[in-house]
Amino acid sequence: MNKQPDPAPVEPANVDLGRRHALQAGGLAIAFLWLGTGGTASAMISARRQAGDGAAAQADGNPSFAPNAFIRIDTSGKVRLVMPSAEMGQSIYTGCSMLLAEELGVGLDQITVEHSPPSDELYGIPLLGGQITGGSTSTRATWQVLREAGAVARSMLVSAAAAQWHVDPASCTVDRGTVHHVASGRSLGFGALATAAGKLPMPDKVQLTDPKDFKLIGKPMRRVDAVDKIKGATQFGIDVQVPGMKVATVMACPTFGGKLASLDDKAARALPGVIEVLRLDNAVAVVGEHFWAAKQGLHALNIHWDRGENANLTTQQLRDGLADAARHGKGIPARNDGDQPQGTLVQSEYRSPMLAHATMEPMNATVHVTPDQCEIWVGTQVPARAQQEAAKITGLPLDKVIVHNQYLGGGFGRRLETDWVEQAVAFAKQVPYPLKVVWTREEDIRHDRMRPMYHDVISAVVDADGKPVWYGYRTSGSSVLARFAPAAMGKDGMDSDAVECVAEIPYDIPKGKVEWIRHDMPTGLVTGWWRGVGPTHNLFVVESFIDELAHRAKQDPLAYRRALLQKSPRALGVLNLAAEKIGWGAQPLPARTGRGIAVAEPFGSHVCAIVEAEVTPQGEVRLRRVVVGIDVGIAVNTSSIEAQVQGGLIFGLSAAMYSGLSIKDGAIEQGNFNDYRVLRINESPLVEVHRVINAEPPGGLGEVGTAIAAPALANAIFAATGVRLYQLPVDRALLVQSPDALKSVAAASTDTGRVPA
Amino acid sequence: MLSLSVNGQSHALDVPDDMPLLWVLRDVIGLTGTKFGCGVAQCGACTVHLDGQPVRSCVLPVGAIGNRTITTIEAIGATPAGQKIQQAWLEVDVVQCGYCQSGQIMSAAALLQRTPNPSDADIDAAMSGNICRCGTYVRIRAAIKQAATGTPEILQTLVSAPQGAAP
């Protein structure tokens, strides 16, 4: 990381709390901005006191001072901060705490954090139209409002102190939870002021800290959840223990859309520790005294499934359908700048596989349904949605469904869904005791809501110098958005996520035509959000193809991109930074070692990754090093930025190297980490993160590294071997050493220092 | 009745001999720091120490443990290697979601215990059985080296900004 201090961002210090915040969109968020007046755009976090605040604070220990939905201070001086977003590893609890604490005037060591209760009204993210943690939106959405919320609280605490001392509030200062009046040497802690502050009116305006005076923002602050996490003391959903609780594990019909035909549970019920066997239309659960008994019981069941209409489905059928759609289907235009110009047409087709999330914590939920109440303990990215779905299943009013969010053992979009929560509620409804439903890893992978598979046809018309003057893109795939938020679908049924990072590109290519050909999966095969969403898929195609064009033009991929990025200074900035830090072209690389560039502007940020990979003569890929240039605008937590970029890249590289789900006889073939391989430490590269420092508003970060990983890897493999990868994951059989391939790489790029064999 | 020594405490347990230690720890004794990730010794989230050696508790039948003592993440901080590893984990802020980190720390503490100054190859060998989906591997490697040498390897985190001047 760069360690020089940030220049002061320029922004108004005096904030009118009534105005709406202009937010920089990107990624998934763009789709939801289209909600307009027809959607649920009223959902909105606010620094002001809102309807529902009082009840929420009362339910949360009724603190003496709760000026808004985020801050609770009682007379002991204890400061509790309520987190609008869910913590799934991305460090948002630390980021949100820093924003609140910076303005409130407390240290991160003086606060405790709490999960928010379900409420679209109090904790809804405007970009997403609800209480949703996703789309790399959390920092973008809270950057302003949480500082204001902290400033509101500080202003009221200062007013309370000033009134008591009969001095001008402007003559008071705040430091580490204490208000001081330096002139008279008096000071009062927040605890002593809480009751008085709680009776004061909300200020109309607040003074935000001048960025040059930030004590926390812009520093590498330690995570607020770190100490518990290193001691095994953090409570994840799977760790919840409720008195009288029993543990269940489940098996749903392996085929998509299949049903339970019959069940013989005699042997299972006879096992020690097995308590009950429960049924749903499409799944069974065995309840035990502990998970082991439940799992033994599940194995002892004799289940007969009605495998349904997809009983013979295969991956190949899905691939063929997508390819046909991409080549011949009628597209919905995302962009069309007129007729394709005359010139040389270059065209390639790319395929991306279905992916599982494989969060380290398998899906689980603990549910207690009584005649008048449903109580749920679950780690979720969508607490309000979980509450709403449980209310539908139990028939209880919304306020009788209590959701206790937990730390998430990974999210990656999997926990934007509520399918497993709904299933747990449906099972728990059948028993009087609290039921913890824990999926096996096999269940978790086979009944994931998979990242869709895609088939893309990308093309360009190039001029005599090999420079593109027009680009075409036809992408086919299912729509996650159409199911997840139908109201957010655009004109003509357009799914903006499907074309994110391709309808708009940083390159100066005058014209283009971008179309999405909707191709739904068979009934029962539900696709879902996966880290990096549209950009992860589209950037593999776009940035691989740009590399193809560079090599076709016999130009260095860095120089080729530079020439096309002259009108995108921030993209050019990260490209130049990464190239400089890796020493592009400075030293010859060993044989079958290559560097691949990818640059893009996903989620309101700007990123360039350069992967250096070695391919053994046998076709094994060794990831030697990755250097990243990143421009996220203002940095909240410089440590988290580095960690998110590193982790996001490794998540993306892991998928590109190994991951892909396949279907045989209507069911997912993979089931655990032996056949759904992920990257391990011995295969993982060093990832260096270098930041462009400026005062632009913060961009999104959680998915940026993931979205840029695959094309940088594919381009590195091409540089090392001359083999262009048109589908993921990497097929090692294609990479076995071939003298012809090495000749072509040497011919294609002589100026990047590669030495042919 | 089976007797197990966990973190210095003896437990008399009425559980089947073939029950994996993981579920005895989590669902019977109530020590939930040790995690379930795969159930087939592929991910390392369930790693505990048996007489100081790292083992995958999800495939270890309790009947096979005998008199060997069990140490879990809840007590590893009481060992010199565990204390150093946990401290380094904080200093460079290794954790993200944190779910795999109990297992990572148990494997790393066992490594440091037997190899006080591990090489990259030692780290690869000892840690490759522990999967992290958040991709914390870069910091895990740095933290192990920092725990071994006491020398800062990479960016160090701050607990709270110092008073007055910027850090």
Image (spheres, coloured by chain):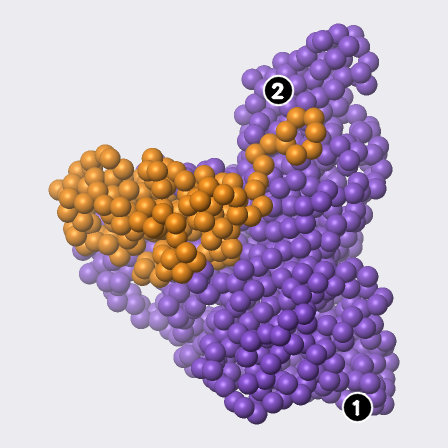
Chain colours: A purple, B orange
Is residue A213 toward the left or the right of residue B155 in the image?
right
Residue at the extreme left of the image, as rendered: B1
Give the labeled residue for mark 2.
Answer: A64
Chain letter behind tag 1: A
Q: Report x, y in % for residue B61.
A: 21, 53
**Please, what is the three-letter code of the amino acid marked with disc 2?**
Ser
User: Quadrant location of the C terminus of chain A?
Assistant: bottom right
Question: As displayed, is residue A485 above or below residue A186?
Answer: below
Task: Please tell me the numbered disc located at residue A344.
Answer: 1
Chain letter behind tag 2: A
Q: Nearer the viewer, residue A516 or A257?
A: A516
Q: Between disc 2 and disc 1, whose residue precedes? A: 2
Asked if marks 2 and 1 touch (Cβ < 8 Å), the reply is no
Q: How many numbered dots are placed on residues in this image?
A: 2
Crowd class of label 1 (few under 14; some 14 to 19; many from 20; radius 10 Å) = few
Q: Report x, y in % for residue A25.
A: 75, 55
Question: As displayed, is residue A619 above or below residue A397?
Answer: below
**Please, what is the three-letter code of the amino acid marked with disc 1?**
Thr
Q: Are marks 2 and 1 on the same chain?
A: yes
Q: Report x, y in % for residue A217.
A: 69, 38
The residue depicted at 57 percent of the width and 40 percent of the height is B157
Q: Nearer the viewer, residue A345 or B158?
A: B158
> Which of the 4 image quadrants contains residue B1?
top left
Q: Nearer the viewer, residue B140 or A120?
A: B140
Q: Nearer the viewer, mark 2 or mark 1?
A: 1
Q: Nearer the viewer, residue A707 or B75?
A: B75
SS under mark 1: strand
Is residue A105 toward the left or the right of residue A613 in the image?
right
Viewer can see residue A149: no
Question: As displayed, is residue B166 above or below residue A515?
Answer: above
